[in-house]
Image: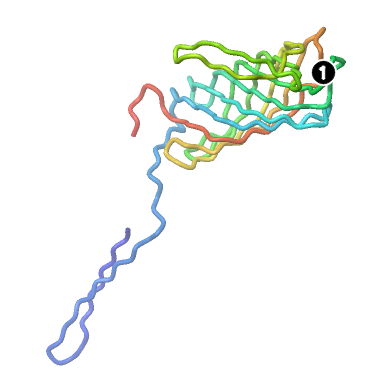
């Protein structure tokens, strides 16, 4: 807020006036802390995944999460998780009435920020890990149940037809824009390369590029926040 005081005398018989004018500014400088020059930070990305497949002529939808730690100012390392699923037309030579494909990725993620500013992050990434493909038959639902420390969970899912495991290498680029003290809006573009033989599907049928959008939490770890 900017306060300006103007005093002036208005001429007149035995009359003097003093006027004070105050002007408020809508814009106020951000007070978000600047962590761009520090290390020991952590970032968690909660992402929605969109993966068009030219080989399948369909798009897979899913969700994922990336968790990384910054041991250096611009370099981060951590874990990558993604699960995508949808009913497809391709049977991969299997006897399936209503094929349903599920892809699960887990890998070691490394990122390097080309731009690391208080309100903007632009980085390159490389993930190495495992991609598991599950082909199910949605026309045949199977009842399942399992027990956890919180109780029993149960439901129905498509009958498992076959699975395949592939080595995953996934380069990508990401952009994060700050929208809160520790909240960022993040978008990513990745290209997956799969390797592996003797599987029910060729790696080229499942590999491809994908787009992710979501929300990130980013801030210091082990230091006092300002």
Query: Residue 3 appears at what percent x and percent y?
Result: 28, 63
Query: Residue 220 appears at what percent x and percent y?
Result: 41, 27
Examine the rendered structure and indicate whether residue 210 appears above or below residue 163. below
Examine the rendered structure and indicate whether residue 105 appears above or below residue 87. above
- Give the left or right position of residue 181, taking residue 95 as reference: left
Query: Residue 181 appears at what percent x and percent y?
Result: 42, 39
Q: Quadrant of residue 132?
A: top right
In this view, the residue in front, 78 or 20, is 78
**Which residue is found at the position 48% from the left and 31% from the top?**
217
Q: Given the current orientation, which residue lies at the most extreme left position?
A: 14
- Give the left or right position of residue 85, taking residue 179 as reference: right
Examine the rendered structure and indicate whether residue 132 appears above or below residue 55. above
Examine the rendered structure and indicate whether residue 95 appears above or below residue 36. above
In this view, the residue in front, 43 or 140, is 140
Q: Quadrant of residue 186?
A: top right
Q: Given the current orientation, which residue lies at the most extreme bottom position?
A: 13
Query: Residue 152 appears at what percent x and percent y?
Result: 50, 14
Q: Given the current orientation, which residue lies at the most extreme top position?
A: 198
Q: Quadrant of the N terminus?
A: bottom left
Q: Quadrant of the C terminus?
A: top left
- Give the left or right position of residue 171, taking residue 183 as reference: right
Disc count in the image?
1
Crowdedness of circle 1 by 10 Å Cα count: few (<14), some, many (20+)? some
In this view, the residue in front, 128 or 197, is 197
**Which residue is found at the position 78% from the left and 29% from the top?**
53
Q: Which residue is mark 1?
A: 96
Q: Quadrant of residue 134?
A: top right
Question: Please, what secondary structure does the residue beneath circle 1 have?
Answer: loop
């Amino acid at each position: 807020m900017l306060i300006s005081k103007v005093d002036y005398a208005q001429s007149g018989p035995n009359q003097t006036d003093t006027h004070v004018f105050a002007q408020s500014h809508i814009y106020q400088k951000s007070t978000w802390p600047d962590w761009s020059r520090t290390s020991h930070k952590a970032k968690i990305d909660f992402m929605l995944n969109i993966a068009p497949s030219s080989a399948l002529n369909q798009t897979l939808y899913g969700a994922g999460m990336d968790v990384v730690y910054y041991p250096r100012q611009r370099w981060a390392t951590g874990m990558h998780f993604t699960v995508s699923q949808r009913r497809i037309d391709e049977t991969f030579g299997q006897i399936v009435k209503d094929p349903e494909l599920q892809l699960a990725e887990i890998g070691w993620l490394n990122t390097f920020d080309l731009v690391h500013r208080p309100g903007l992050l632009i980085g390159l990434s490389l993930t190495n890990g495992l991609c598991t493909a599950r082909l199910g038959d949605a026309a045949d639902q199977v009842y399942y149940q399992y027990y956890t420390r919180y109780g029993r969970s149960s439901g129905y899912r498509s009958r498992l037809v076959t699975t395949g495991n592939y080595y995953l290498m996934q380069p990508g680029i990401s952009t994060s824009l700050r929208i809160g003290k520790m909240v960022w809006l993040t978008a990513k573009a990745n290209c997956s390369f799969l390797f592996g033989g003797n599987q029910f599907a060729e790696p080229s049928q499942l590999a491809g590029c994908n787009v992710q959008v979501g929300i990130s939490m980013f801030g210091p770890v082990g230091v006092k926040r300002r």
